[in-house]
Image: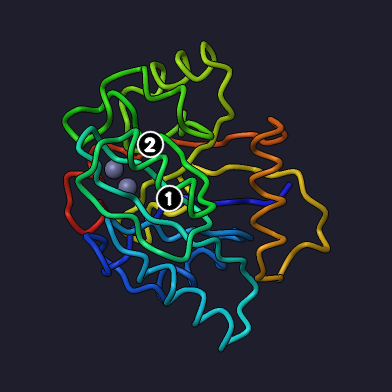
Amino acid sequence: MLKYEPHVHSNHSDGNNSVKEILDEAIKKKIEIISITDHDTLNGSLEAIEIVNEEHLPIIVIPGIEISTKNGHLLVYRIDREVEKGMEMAETIKAAKELGGFTVLTHPFEFYRHGCVKPNYFKHVDAVEVFNAKSYLNFLASYFANKYKKPIMAGSDAHSVYTIGYGLTLVDLNVEMKHKNDNTVSNRVFEAIMGFKVKIEGKRVPLRLRLTKLFK
Ligand SMILES: [Zn+2]
Ligand SMILES: [Zn+2]
């Protein structure tokens, strides 16, 4: 099983660390696949791809972005263009899919952190983040993902290197897929997620760490 960390913020949005620091920490934690999902910008992902290619780092980067829609946050993977923020959730999902994006509802019901509040959106996305290391409402995300028979993922939502890996999606792929940075890998990853061939692993970020800005 390959370790995929699909939800990390860098200093391209509100994260504490640079992309390089995030990649180094992920490699140290033996994470094989990562997505930098900054708020409303693909720049973190693009920089990660550049660094990995230039320095031949042993990690696969799948581009990602966390879009602020009018109705809550939405993760989109495998796109090379940004989708406008501030649109309706349904409209954003449609636009992202037209670009070939893989759409994931993140920390649903967490209205105090811009999670969507309507279960209705579960129907439209490709998958649901049923474990977010910062969320108190993962049980509700799981309940509705199960109800709507949606594929599942887990992510840390790390805003600092300390909490990278607190939420992981374990993907059943051949090991020879390692160290390749092309679309084949991301397609295989999302095929596995769609086929329910993943396991999720996670531990919640302790409140004492979240209260210290450095560890958020
Ligand atoms: Zn969010
Ligand atoms: Zn996030």
Q: Is the residue 156 above or below the residue 109 in the image?
A: below
Does the beta carbon at disc 1 come under 8 Å from ligand 2?
Answer: yes
Count of marks placed on residues: 2
Residue 65 at x, y percent in the picture: 38, 55
Please say if 20 is above or below 211.
below
Q: Position of residue 80 (x, y in %)?
A: 47, 66
Amino acid under label 2?
A: Thr
Looking at the image, which is closer to me, 205 or 190? 190
Asked if residue 199 lies left or right of residue 157, the reply is right
Q: Which of the labelled discs sits on residue 106, or is there none? A: 2
Q: Can you tell which of label 1 and label 2 is closer to the viewer? A: 2
Q: Is mark 2 within 8 Å of ligand 1?
A: yes
Asked if disc 1 and disc 2 are in contact, CB closer than 8 Å, the reply is yes
Which dot marks residue 7? Answer: 1
Q: Name the secondary structure under disc 2.
A: loop
Q: Is residue 45 above or below residue 188?
A: below
